[in-house]
Image (cartoon, helix red, strand yellow):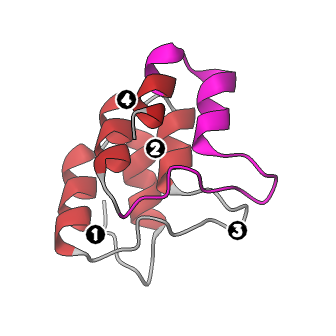
Amino acid sequence: MSTPSSDDPGAFFAAARTGDVSTLAACLVNGSCNPNARTATGWTALHFAVFYGNIPVVRLLAASPRVDVNALSAKGTSPITLALKHQGSHMLEILLRR
């Protein structure tokens, strides 16, 4: 996997989808990428992590003060909305505790 960067957030999104916590943590610590970067449809890494059920990634991202847990996609979907629709209450609790 390539290293995430602000210039190319694709690797950050891929790490969120696949559960690559170490890559995401390194990116958050060294500031090499924007954790709130968006796809063309407005999804952030947190949207992907919630949708794909990657609880360790959701915990990591939700714990970062740099991550917007209320980010809305182009269709008005937030990570919390995705958790309500596609995941169990545990995922929702992680997001709401923020």
| SS state under label 4 | helix
Q: Quadrant of residue 84?
A: top right
How far is the residue under mark 2 from the one under mark 1?
15 Å
Left or right: residue 50 versus residue 57 is right
| SS state under label 3 | loop
Q: Are marks 4 and 2 in contact (CB under 8 Å)?
A: no
Q: Which mark is residue 3?
A: 1
Q: Quadrant of residue 20?
A: top left
Left or right: residue 60 versus residue 14 is left
Pick whichever, 37 or 12, lies toward us: 37
Mark 3 or 2, nearer chain start: 2
Residue position marked by numbered label 3 in the rendering: 40
Percent of width and height locating residue 63: 30, 46
Residue at x 57%, y 35% (from the top left corner): 51
Percent of width and height locating residue 1: 30, 59
Q: Which residues are magenta?
A: 66-91
How far is the residue under mark 4 from the one under mark 2?
11 Å
Residues packed near mark 3 inside 10 Å, few (<14), some (14 to 19) or many (20 plus): few
Magenta span contains residue 21: no
How far is the residue under mark 4 from the one under mark 3?
24 Å
Camera-nearest label, 4 or 3: 4
Mark 1 or 3, nearer chain start: 1
Q: Which mark is residue 17?
A: 2
Mark 4 or 1, nearer chain start: 1
| SS state under label 2 | helix
Task: Identify which amino acid the numbered label 2 is placed on.
Answer: Arg
Percent of width and height locating residue 22: 18, 50
Q: Which mark is residue 55?
A: 4
Asked if 40 appears above or below 96 in the picture, the reply is below
Q: Are marks 2 and 1 in contact (CB under 8 Å)?
A: no
Task: Identify which amino acid the numbered label 3 is placed on.
Answer: Ala
Residue at x 48%, y 54% (from the top left corner): 45
